Image: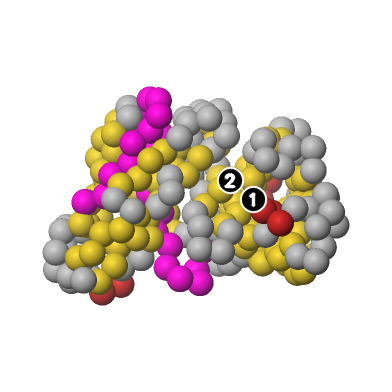
Amino acid sequence: EIVLTQSPATLSLSPGERATLSCRASQSVSSYLAWYQQKPGQAPRLLIYDASNRATGIPARFSGSGSGIDFTLTISSLEPEDFAVYYCQQRSDWPLTFGGGTKVEIK
Amino acid sequence: EVQLVESGGGLVQPGGSLRLSCAASGFTFSNYWMHWVRQAPGKGLVWVSGISGSGSGVRYADSVKGRFTISRDNAKNTLSLQMDSLRAEDAAVYYCAGTRVIMSRVDWFDPWGQGTLVTVSS
């Protein structure tokens, strides 16, 4: 099973600041990695797919990078609605797996 | 409008059974692999099971293999999860989600339902 490790677990930032979230895979997943955003009481929402492609309707302040083992989600300037939990997920192999999540909270 | 609506959650005793359903609309259901993803209270997302568009291919997480059965009815645009021998650790919100298939590989989870809560307690 491919294990995805996200860091940090919690990121405390102010609106307008830059957020950098990390996801490391236990083995190469090529570019088969996605990022999801989840707000309390809501289902996850696809943000980034195939490591660096924004999903439909996702603002340009969200960007993804990386390949192989190390991946990064960057939010260039945090908006109030961006404070949420973010998960990475791989589709390189079964079982499909998620990282443990990074909570972006208001400082 | 693309929509997934789960139902069937509730309170069940350890060792009991429950059947979840997911009604799909607004997209070509049979073109999607469909999955169940769960989230225990305050915890992260865990993929549980998936089924191919035709229903011929199924996958399970090791933690539920032999206890849960996924199925689909493409005529009714419905996904189901039969959960038997339930344990306390199965308690979670269960989401149904769809993935397309790109070059023989499942794509990303999109769309998602809003989830249904399963509580396992005596």
Mark 2 falls on what kind of element?
strand
From the viewer's perspective, is residue A30 above or below residue B84? Answer: above
Q: Return the x and y of residue A89 as percentages of the image width and height.
A: 44, 43
Of residues B73 and A106, the one drawn nearer to the viewer in this rendering: A106
Chain ID, mark 2: B
Of residues A48 and A23, the one drawn nearer to the viewer in this rendering: A23
Specify whether residue A28 is painted magenta: yes
| Residue appearing at x 23%, y 64% in the figure | A12
| Residue appearing at x 76%, y 59% in the figure | B20
Magenta part of the protein: which range? Answer: A20-43
The kind of residue on which mark 1 rests is: Trp
Q: Is residue A101 left or right of residue B42?
A: left
Q: Is residue A68 left or right of residue A18?
A: right
C-alpha span from label 1 to label 2: 6 Å
Does the CB distance between marks 1 and 2 fall below 8 Å? yes
| Residue appearing at x 77%, y 69% in the figure | B11
The kind of residue on which mark 2 rests is: Trp
For label 1, the residue is B36
Residue A40: which disc? none
Q: Return the x and y of residue B59 as percentages of the image width and height.
A: 68, 35
